[in-house]
Image (cartoon, grey):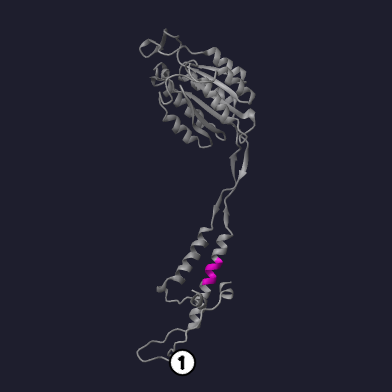
């Protein structure tokens, strides 16, 4: 198109010494035919152009079909990071540990088993915020949970705000049907911070079709009383666990309330949750695709470089010389 549409450059009028074709001057070597060199360059140019066209066609290689779990539920974990979560009254097979460490360990096992579900993470204490939005990347959610620590969001407990944030995160129009949206809330205290009351937030969640499972964490004991620990009975610093409110939240939204006094009970609760909210097991066909356009694209660019580099010994085509 350029050769046909662009005007020719004006020819120079200076005289030039012309030698007959095939004449070899003394002390010089015979040069290859200009026509043969031009056709060689033109052939490489067309070959490079065809390779670029092939790359633009985007060739692909389809691998063998494989099964892939169908997207199941949206599951949000809300984990309490208030000051009382550091009490070492949680019995594990390896000894006594604090409540948050035990929660992390068993929650990670729960997350690992939710293949096909989108998992999210909310951390709350005085404030509540989304640490991990809903994602299929379970490893990232596990890492973010492991990196959480007491006091990251304050020292109090805002259960209502955590539920409200979960409602906003789970009830958008891009997720699964409302019956497949679940919040698992873990706390060891009562609501003593935040702008939203827990039962008010639960009513909003029920209206939006969000099901809430609440888990009360910690050994028996009341405010100013004692709890079981590695040294026998230890005084509790935090307020008593508000089991009536946690039970009401679960019942109002169609979920259940569980009590976890040690690691064995916590593990049993997650097994029960897997029974109540089973992972979708149906599979749909999927064929992995490998892109191949890079090979013809690379070969075409190499040919273009061969044409443009002076060291190749090939002159540019005649139309390039006239219109450059």
Note whether residue 270 is visible.
no
Which image quadrant is residue 214 in? top right
Q: Residue at x 52, y 62 (%)?
A: 296
Q: Secondary structure at mark 1?
A: loop
User: Horizontal and vertical percent for residue 292?
Assistant: 53, 57
Note whether residue 323 is visible.
yes
Q: Label 1 neighbourhood size at 10 Å, few (<14), some (14-19), many (20+)?
A: few
Magenta span contains residue 49: yes
User: Horizontal and vertical percent for residue 93?
Assistant: 41, 20
Count of labels in the image: 1
User: Horizontal and vertical percent for residue 90?
Assistant: 42, 17
Q: Quadrant of the N terminus?
A: bottom right
Please report the bounds of the magenta region as a residue range: 45-50
User: Horizontal and vertical percent for residue 79?
Assistant: 48, 24
Magenta span contains residue 144: no
Q: Residue under label 1, please give it.
A: 20
* 28 shown above or below 208: below
- Of 315 and 312, the residue lying toward us: 315
What secondary structure characterizes most of the magenta part?
Answer: helix
In-image side of 194 versus 65 (left or right) = left
Furthest-top residue in this view? 225
Q: Residue at x 41, y 19 (%)?
A: 83
Q: Residue at x 43, y 14 (%)?
A: 238
């Amino acid at each position: 198109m350029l050769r046909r549409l662009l005007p020719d450059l004006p020819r120079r009028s200076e005289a030039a010494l012309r030698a007959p074709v095939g004449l070899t001057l003394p002390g010089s070597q015979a040069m290859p035919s200009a026509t043969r060199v031009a056709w060689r360059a033109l052939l490489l140019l067309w070959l490079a152009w065809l390779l670029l066209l092939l790359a633009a066609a985007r060739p692909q290689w389809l691998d063998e079909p494989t099964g892939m779990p169908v997207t199941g539920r949206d599951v949000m974990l809300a984990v309490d990071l208030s000051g009382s979560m550091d009490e070492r009254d949680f019995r594990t097979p390896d000894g006594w540990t604090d409540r948050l460490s035990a929660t992390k360990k068993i929650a990670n096992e729960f997350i690992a088993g939710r293949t096909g579900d989108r998992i999210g993470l909310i951390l709350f204490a005085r404030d509540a915020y989304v640490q991990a939005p809903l994602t299929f990347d379970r490893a990232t959610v596990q890492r973010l949970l492991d990196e959480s620590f007491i006091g990251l969001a304050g020292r109090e407990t805002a259960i209502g705000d955590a539920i409200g944030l979960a409602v906003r995160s789970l009830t958008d129009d891009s997720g699964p049907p409302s019956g497949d949206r679940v919040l698992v809330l873990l706390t060891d205290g009562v609501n003593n911070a935040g702008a939203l009351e827990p039962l008010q937030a639960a009513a909003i969640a029920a209206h939006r079709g969000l099901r809430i499972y609440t888990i009360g964490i910690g050994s028996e004991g009341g405010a100013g009383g004692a709890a079981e620990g590695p040294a026998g009975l230890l005084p509790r610093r935090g307020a008593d666990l508000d089991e009536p409110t946690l039970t009401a939240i679960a019942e109002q939204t169609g979920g259940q309330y569980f009590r976890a006094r040690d690691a064995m009970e916590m593990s049993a609760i997650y097994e029960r949750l897997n029974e109540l909210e089973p992972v979708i097991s149906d599979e749909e066909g999927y064929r992995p695709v490998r892109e191949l356009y890079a090979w013809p694209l690379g070969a075409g660019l190499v040919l273009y470089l061969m044409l443009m580099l002076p060291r190749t010994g090939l002159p540019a085509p005649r139309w390039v010389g006239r219109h450059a």
